[in-house]
Amino acid sequence: MHEILLYYKYTAIANPGEFCRTQKLLCEKLGLKGRIIIAPEGINGTVEGAPENTQKYINETTSDPRFADMNFKRSPGTGNAFPKLSVKVRSEIVSAHLGNDDVNPAITTGKYLSPEQLHDWIHGRKEFYIIDMRNDYEQAVGFFKNSILPPLGHFRDLPKILPQLAHLKNKTVVTVCTGGVRCEKASGFLVKHGFKDVYQLHNGIVSYMEKYPDEDFAGKLYVFDGRVTMAFSSPEKEHEIVGHCRKCHVPNENFVNCLLPTCHDHFICCANCLNKKGEPFCSWRCALAQKLRLLVATISA
């Protein structure tokens, strides 16, 4: 039996390198695998291990006053959700690269909205707009019904989609993302740019789906580990498939990476749209480029 923890905390870390070392030693001692990013602004992690060891990790990490109130989202693991342990120091815990537009969530962020409050809003008469701040390939496999899905190729594209949201500046908006970490900056970004009534779904979509598994969110939730996607439907109810094969557009949820190394595009593709060898390519151009690449390699050998 395995368990996956998803967590983050924006808090000042004076010596990220030293904290990185202690986190790595702790995870190695407990046999945890996963990805942890540490930056001067905080920590962002997803780890997998035996439940007794994930609990020990929680106990040890929250014994540090900086992380005493950090929220840990738990979900069943597979034992191979991550190939290894990676604990690294970065300049940010979410790669926003907003430059002069960067936001410090400790100073500027949206108001927290609990899953229960959002559920009441969705099923009530309040006027508000859900803005999905995840990447477009995450949106492709699942999303809140009637939500706004900006074309975000990367989180750093946030300034590019701002004009598309400008008409909502005087409306109530709720930003959503997987676990909440991106919304801390995304909601703050909207506040910084003049949006008057900005909320963020506290602890992310995963927390909402755990409480309301058969309501409001269509499809599956994209996750950044070996599971790729998660369904939260109860056993007696099949979830709605909203994803579509990029090539033939049939309903599908199978993600692949384009085999061309210089492309490696991540997209949904059904089995019928793989090539004769069962290989994925996002376009005929990439398939041709791969053939030429292999031909050149053979001639050069």
Image (cartoon, rainbow, N blue to C red):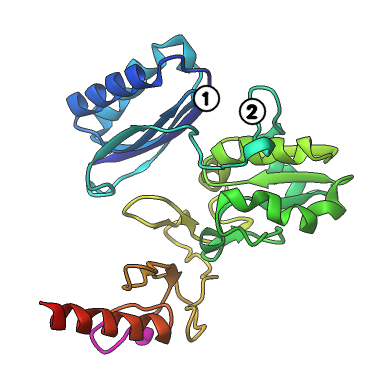
The residue positioned farthest toward the bottom in the image shown: 276
Place residue 252 in its image quadrant. bottom left
> Does the magenta portion include 276?
yes
Marks 1 and 2 close (CB-CB < 8 Å)? yes
Q: Quadrant of the N terminus?
A: top left
Q: Which residue is mark 1?
A: 41
Q: What secondary structure is marked by label 1?
A: loop
Q: Earlier in the sequence, mark 1 or mark 2?
A: 1
23 in relation to 97, above or below = above
113 in relation to 291, above or below = above
269 in relation to 165, above or below = below
Q: Position of residue 150 (x, y in %)?
A: 67, 59
Q: Which residue is mark 2?
A: 105
Query: What residue is rendered at 36% in x and 34% in y?
Result: 36
Q: Report the Cα–Cα distance between label 1 and label 2.
A: 9 Å
The magenta span reads 272-278
**Is 117 on the left or on the right of 1, as rendered?**
right
- Residue type of the residue flagged with mark 2: Pro
> Does the magenta portion include 10?
no
The residue positioned farthest toward the right in the image shown: 170
Residue 180 in sight: no
Q: Nearer the viewer, residue 295 or 200?
A: 295
- Residue type of the residue flagged with mark 1: Glu
